[in-house]
Image: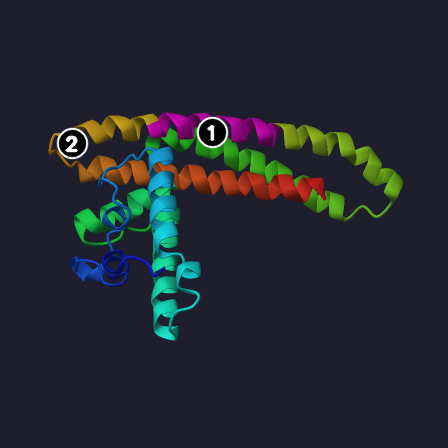
Amino acid sequence: MPPPVALVAKVLAPEPLARSVVDYFELLGAPRRPWLDPEILKSKFLQLSAEVHPDRVHGGSAEAKRQAQNAYTELNTAYQTLRVPKERLAHLLELEAGHKPAAIQTAPGELMDLFLEIGNQCREADKFIHERRAVTSPLLRVGLFEKGEQIAEKLRAMQGLLTRRSEAAEKGLMDLNATWESGVKDLDKLEKSYRTFSYLARWSEQLQERLVQLAL
């Protein structure tokens, strides 16, 4: 059974926006808001993707298969963008302001203490990892195990702190939704939230990289 023509057309030829940006909120039938309920978003994605899944046209023409694949790929891209706060906010800013957010140069002031602490923790881990590489004796490497575990524990503690800050930032997005629903779209606050999530995500990746290296 072929996918609904209207849905395929919507995916392949969305309403033109500034700079031909595809509105992923519209594509998934989600409100254009800073915060989205993850379960509702997932449900909409699963419903729509099932309707345009390439398997539905396995007996169709090459063109029908191509359209179904393109539609499915576009929906997946939309979902992966909107499910991640940083990516969702960047997309929302581009839709509302007509351009992508500027490159991030400095951490937000309220995150500066966290920025400095994570920097110190990463430098300590990097120094230990570098020193450990120079040790070739299995016996000596065993002796370094405890120190490596202590450093890893500090990194995991920082990850926990980042998780709590991310949860607090999510709550801020829910509060920001209320102002958007009243018709007040504060793009400055939206960009500030984007920068917060961008730094939190970046730091989380940096900590995870060190933990992986420490585990080797």
- Residue type at numbered disc 2: Glu
Identify residue for label 2: 181
- Residue type at numbered disc 1: Thr
User: In front here: 169 or 83?
Assistant: 83
Give the colouring mode of the picture. rainbow
Magenta span: predominant SS is helix
**Which residue does the image show at 55% across and 34% down from the upper left?**
120
Q: Nearer the viewer's eye, disc 2 or disc 1? A: 2
- Placement of 95 over or under 169, stated as above or below: below
Q: Quadrant of residue 77?
A: bottom left
- Placement of 12 over or under 134, stated as above or below: below
Q: Quadrant of residue 112?
A: top left
User: Is residue 142 magenta-colored?
Assistant: no
Residue 85, percent across and down?
A: 36, 39
Give the quadrant of the C terminus.
Answer: top right
Q: Which mark is residue 163?
A: 1
User: Is residue 159 magenta-colored?
Assistant: yes
